[in-house]
Amino acid sequence: MKNFYWAGSEMPQGQSYARLIIQNKITPKTNLLPSEHEESEGEELTSDEKNSYASYLASIIYDYQLKYVSIFLLTFLSMLKFDFAYAQETTKSEIVPLQIGQKVPEEFWTKEHLFYINCDTVRKSLEEHKGKMVVLDFWMTGCMPCLLHQKEINRFKEKYPDELYIVMINSLKTKENYKKIHSFASSDRYKSLNLGMLNSIIEDNYLQMMFPYRSYPSYFWINESGILQTHTYRNLLDPNYQPPFILNK
């Protein structure tokens, strides 16, 4: 088939090979030409044979195109997934854990957080409390001391509203989302503590990365100048609490 090209390539085996492909691949159960009418190697293919052969080549080309398109899509999706993961890792790396004595970045005040307030949610920042003593109170629903300490903490909130701001924070590491926290805040267990309406930042990731901790409760104390002064696992806002380094007399 010197003058028959498909997809830019010539079949060097000739017409007899083309007929063999047609008979074996396209119509394996039906001979295109009866054996008593077999054509010699130099004869032209019939119109039906040419059409069948063209269909066969077209199917091969389609299979190759489908294969390469699939490879391209898989490669593209893999690159997209890598870029997304890299972007997440880059975002995480930008949040540097704060050390004692360091000042919080400006973003700490301006970034909006998801607050659970009075059985509803609202997004707002901590900017209105800039210039106060700010205490970050990390908690989880399974931590009873986290909740019992709120009674004493609430007394200080009421006594020093202009100088002190204490915010409860339930971070993503607790694996407690809005649904679970709302269910907890509506439970008899929480109501029996007489703590009033639950007010807390929920589903937090930003603060837990800037202020890493390992147990509950955890308190981070930021002074009026925005400097992280200390990190404690004990609520210091308790008039009945006496530090262990002070001897009783």
Image: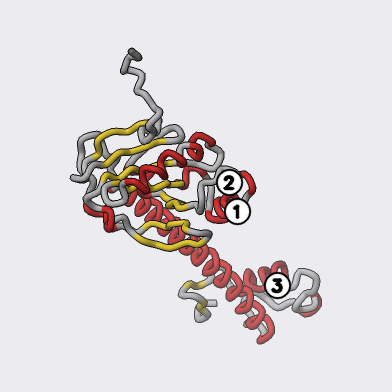
Q: Would you say 146 lies left or right of 179 here?
A: left
Secondary element at image label 2:
helix
The residue at the point 36 percent across, 51 percent down is: 86
**Amino acid tagged 2:** Tyr
**Residue contact at pointers 1 and 2, CB within 8 angstroms:** yes
The residue tagged 1 is 186
Residue 111's spot in the image, x, y percent?
Answer: 31, 57
**Amino acid tagged 3:** Ile
The residue tagged 3 is 26
Residue 212 visible in the shown view: yes
Q: Which of pointers 2 and 3 indicates the residue nearer the eye? A: 2
Q: Residues within 10 Å of mark 2 (few under 14, many from 20)?
A: some
Secondary element at image label 1:
loop
Residue 190 marker: 2
Between residues 167 and 22, which one lies in front from this camera angle?
167
Secondary element at image label 3:
helix
Residue 89 visible in the shown view: no
Between residues 249 and 30, which one lies in front from this camera angle?
249
Between residues 104 and 198, which one lies in front from this camera angle?
198
Q: Residues within 10 Å of mark 1 (few under 14, many from 20)?
A: some
